Image (spheres, rainbow, N blue to C red):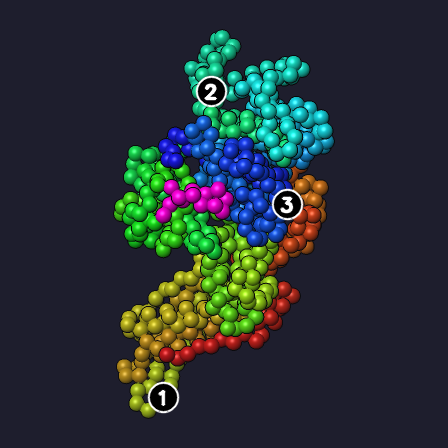
Amino acid sequence: MSYTTENVRNVSIAGHGGTGKTTLFERLLFAGGAISKPETVESGKTVGDYSPEEIERKISIHTALAHVDREGKKINFFDTPGSSDFTGDVILSFRACEFALLVLDGRAGVQIETIKLWRNLEGREKPRGVFIGRLDDDKADYHRVLEDIKEKFKIDPVPVTIPMGRGGAFTGVIDVLGNRAYLIQNGDTPEKEGPVPEEYKDAVDAAREKLIEAAAEGDDTLMEKYLDKGFLDPEELHTGLVEALAEHKFVPAFGGAAPKNSGLIPLLDFICGAVPSPLSARDTIQDGSEEKKKIPVDPEKPLAALVIKTTFDQFSGKLSWVKVITGKLIPDTEAFNVTENKKERVGKLYICQGKKLEEVRELCAGDVGIVTKSASFKTNDTITAGDTSFHFLQLALPEPVHSVAVNAAAKKDEDKLGEALVKAADEDKTFRYQYNAETKETVISGMGELQINIILDKIKANQKIELETHVPKVAYRETIGKKAGAEYTHKKQTGGHGQYGKVMMEIAPLKRGEGYRFVNAIFGGAIPKNYIPGVEKGVIEGMAHGTMAHYPVVDVEVKIVDGKYHPVDSSELSFKLAARNAFREAMKQAGPTLLEPVMNLTVFVEEKYLGDVMSDLSGKRGKILGQDSVGGIAEIRAEVPQAELLRYSIDLRSITSGTGSFTMDFAHYAPISGRIAEDVIKAREHFKVTETEE
């Protein structure tokens, strides 16, 4: 069946780990008729958690996509992971959806990942709602969680459904918009519709009044009528809610108990009736001038789409998830990959129910589907109907926070390991790997220990190879503290032409982060112009390995002030070697200093762990820059040397019983001295610098 853009809804189900997202996803598919029998996470048979590693660990690791057909509308649901280790898959779903449903535990309320996800959605100005689950638990309290949301996010969520009873007395929910009750049934049976019990009518009236106020906020004309007459008719209420939600003027709240199929039908009805279609959305492009601008989702314009995810299936091969922004994507047609600057024929086109693929004839603007076995498509690629100068902005992914050095136990398996790491990085853009020539290590980086362990376990199982891991070495730098000068004459006499070049230079420190500056101050042809490139090459080679611990040298100005050449024996090589040695001699006299990388660190923890985390950061030579607290969740901002953070994901998990999380990015290099510098130098005693005279 084909769907038009106005009949597509894209909904991301997100939230803190363990709040019941996959169960809600499964039960929504059941309530919507997409599956005949709902499964549990424990069974390993859910639509959302289908990979071997998810089934084994009983957690979501990858985003799953499935859809429900309801009232002629196609609702795409993204089931996303809750662990911060897999945040990249949550972000791709946020990019592809027009509405995010944050799932909260009716017992715990707002948790750390809830806050981080909310901030991400705020930055995107993305419409969102909340589903408060597990209301059949004795410790759950729907209204307390609503107050928790209000306190922490400074918004007043508007209930669309309200619970009937609490804990063991919970019998179902009331749909405030439809003025109908939905009662829990026994077994895997959908909730049953019925009239609102008399004792809840006052609560429903009060909740409906809040919904009418929210609808009036969506349109000035409706607000005038509401203020004048005190009510809105059903059609006006619907129109106002659609407009207010599209402009993120209110946050609808839903409740239920997904394992008992409670709260699902009112949620589906609201998504069909009030959640914005893709026609309300805008996506950001950059043209040839790198100017950013927003373009609307438009089915009438030529094809433009973004590849949001890449996966590899053992049966179907490479799968490219594509969000169509404008036009239509049609199988067996030619498309242009703007990112790769090449044309490619699109083969078969699919939509999916978890791992099950369903072939389709087209994909309209706003919809999400899968292209199989594409040669060039990869995550973040822009696909268009023809040659164009614009491309969509890439997914705004966080920087990795945890790194491990890895190698194959057997040297013969290194190529196999490299190929597997490339594929893993294609599938998960928060996972990266590179060979560090400085430390001579292959370093992999990701969002946490769990993510990296799962990737490595998968490689070991699939490739049948043994791996070795260790803490990666830190890429230190060297610089100078004062001005100095030196000269060096390279002179070598062999049979025939000899080698001769003399260089005099002065070096001086630059501000931190300025890198390197080369100044040619030669007058009168003391060094001919055609040899100056050789001089600079020699300086750069000299900076590649400093004089303290053989780390690269940064933040230095090098001025060539004089020299001497021989009309027969001089060459570019002679001046390169002279300059390299002159630089090293000058550096020895210029107060050489070791530099270490310092990171910006932001830590999110429950307030009860604040003191322990602050104490731990102080012990790691951290500099606390500030802290905020929102409703029991503390955010600590600090600058900490990278050397102290190589195992921080493990340390923080230990301190906070697994509840804390953090983000990290590079800040600057800072000088180190004393015992710390001595230890760094000692660790490099056996480092060999191999250089050749070309």
Name the residue furthest bottom.
495
Nearer to us in this view, 243 or 177 = 177
User: Mark 1, mark 2: which one is toward the viewer?
Assistant: 2
| Residue depicted at 30% across the width and 69% down the height | 523
Query: Relative to 218, is 314 above or below?
Result: below
Q: Is residue 86 magenta?
A: no
- The secondary structure that dominates the magenta segment is strand
Q: Earlier in the sequence, mark 1 or mark 2?
A: 2
Nearer to us in this view, 184 or 686 = 184
Which numbered dot is residue 238?
2
Q: Earlier in the sequence, mark 2 or mark 3?
A: 3
> Secondary structure beneath disc 2?
helix
Q: Is residue 170 left or right of residue 498?
A: right
Which numbered dot is residue 42?
3
Q: Amino acid at mark 2?
A: His
Task: Indicate the position of residue 556 as horizontal and vertical percent values.
Answer: 45, 63
User: Mark 2, mark 3: which one is toward the viewer?
Assistant: 3
Name the quarter where the C terminus is drawn.
bottom left
Q: Can I make out residue 687 in this image? A: yes
Task: Indicate the position of residue 189 as horizontal and vertical percent values.
Answer: 60, 31
Q: Which residue is mark 1?
A: 493
Name the residue furthest top.
229
